[in-house]
Amino acid sequence: MGQDQTKQQIEKGLHLYQSNQTEKALRVWMRVLEKSADPAGRFRVLGCLITAHAEMGRYKDMLKKIPAIACMFWTAVITVLTKSSSPQDRQNLIFHWIWFIRIPGLLKFFSYSWEAVLIISHIQANHVIRLQEKFAVVQIDTARELEDPDFLTESYLNLARSNEKLCEFQKTISYCKTCLNMQGTTVSMQLNGQVSLSMGNAFLGLSIFQKALECFEKALRYAHNNDDKMLECRVCCSLGNFYTQIKDYEKALFFPCKAAELVNDYGKGWSLKYRAMSQYHMAVAYRKLGRLADAMDCCEESMKIALQHGDRPLQALCLLCFADIHRSRRDVQTAFPRYDSSMSIMTEIGNRLGLIQVLLGVTKCWMIQKELDKALESIEKAQELAEGLGNKLGLLKLHCLCERIYRTKEQQQELRDHVVKFHECVEEMELYCGMCGESIGEKNNQLQALPCSHFFHLKCLQTNGTRGCPNCRRLSVKPGYV
């Protein structure tokens, strides 16, 4: 297969992939990889394969189907970095390399097939994480060599997104701040909306709610100013998640419904993943509102799309939602296997934040069955994950569950310890209304954010009114953006 035919087949695969015919696209690209004699074409199709498998979360399938690609790709890395004088070649290769080694399953591959890599690189297996940092730095250096601020901004955005997927939230925030501090061109400025969204998701993962909301507001403003409906859809899904966590379930439903409207009105050429994600967040909100039949319908639609396109991360979230719905119906026997399936996929793809949610659900099931010791075992596992991630809201929920368990067991010392820790978490996250002093996130309440992104009970703002924010004393003359 020559250069022209290779290019045509790669484009054919891209067309199939964008049309949601993923399996056909993968077969086309694999055939190119087997038959093409064009090194540049093989390199490009390799990047397509890695990106496609990463986006679908099919890490184990990748290990089974294309283990030889690892060594081939590593050879390409070494060859280009040592022999190519083209900054553009180095930029493209390192972009795909970062995609490649960020996949959790591939780290396992390197641990048991490192002899093949040693032949090429003479590097020990425990240096894989350092390699990611090394190649990320080289990508940034290449962008600087090209003197292209857009490349530099995009390099840091790629780093931020990679770390967000790996639940490395502090690193995500650091890279996002670097992006925002750069003075780039118009293209770089347009990326700021995506940067703000990624930073907001990271702050939300750390349960820093005011900063998360501030970032989401900025991202939404960028989307409106640039008429970027796709970005607006993604921000609305994140806002649905935000309000779910602080228990304003009306807003938690409003924003994914808005995302679904955007998909219906503008998403004819979009990937179906946007519709699937909006339906998933609607399902979560419906369940919280007690509308379990509506929750089941939305979750089933989302799961159908996820199964159709092999979207493993979304499958895991839908299984978690299914399990929560059955638990809400007190049907723990049906919930348990769905929690197990969700946990299996989340462990496979490295979604530690999702694992905390699964373990919280499992804990509540054990409590329904009065199996308090088993509930405490699940809490211990979840607490280790939450502390590792710095997820304060997860810790607060765990302390709340422990309080209930130890109250039932009449163990007063343990009960007092978790009551103290619970209130410490509330204070640290500022999860209380600055007007009435009552906690936020304890039960469903309508909330309203001021322009400073501090939020209060809507009834308190309507009853008392204020010329400024009671928390930061910043002047506020209109309701918050979201």
Image: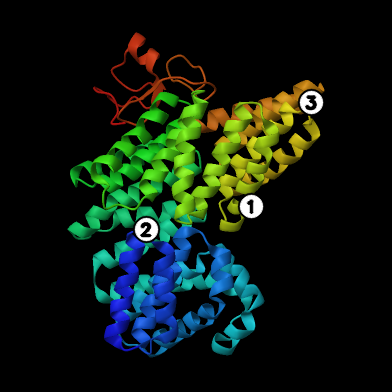
Q: Residue 17's image quarter?
A: bottom left
Crowding around mark 2 (Cα neighbors within 10 Å: few <14, some 14 to 19, many 20+) is: some
Q: Earlier in the sequence, mark 1 or mark 2?
A: 2
To which residue does mark 2 refer? 20
Q: Amino acid at mark 3?
A: Gln
Q: Position of residue 481 (x, y in %)?
A: 28, 31
**Spatial separation of the CA atoms under disc 2 and disc 3:** 56 Å
Q: Earlier in the sequence, mark 2 or mark 3?
A: 2
Q: Position of residue 127 (x, y in %)?
A: 59, 74
Q: Position of residue 293 (x, y in %)?
A: 50, 27
To which residue does mark 1 refer? 344
From the viewer's perspective, tell me whether residue 410 is left or right of residue 83: right
Q: Nearer the viewer, mark 1 or mark 2?
A: 2
Q: Amino acid at mark 2?
A: Asn
Q: Would residue 219 be visible to someone looking at this image? A: no
Q: Nearer the viewer, mark 2 or mark 3?
A: 2
**Element type where label 3 sits in the image:** helix
Q: Residue 392's image quarter?
A: top right
**Spatial separation of the CA atoms under disc 1 and disc 2:** 25 Å
CB atoms of marks 2 and 3 within 8 Å: no
Q: Would residue 185 be visible to someone looking at this image? A: yes
Q: Earlier in the sequence, mark 1 or mark 3?
A: 1
Q: Relative to the observer, which residue lies in front, 9 or 203?
A: 9
Q: Quadrant of the N terminus?
A: bottom left
CB atoms of marks 1 and 3 within 8 Å: no
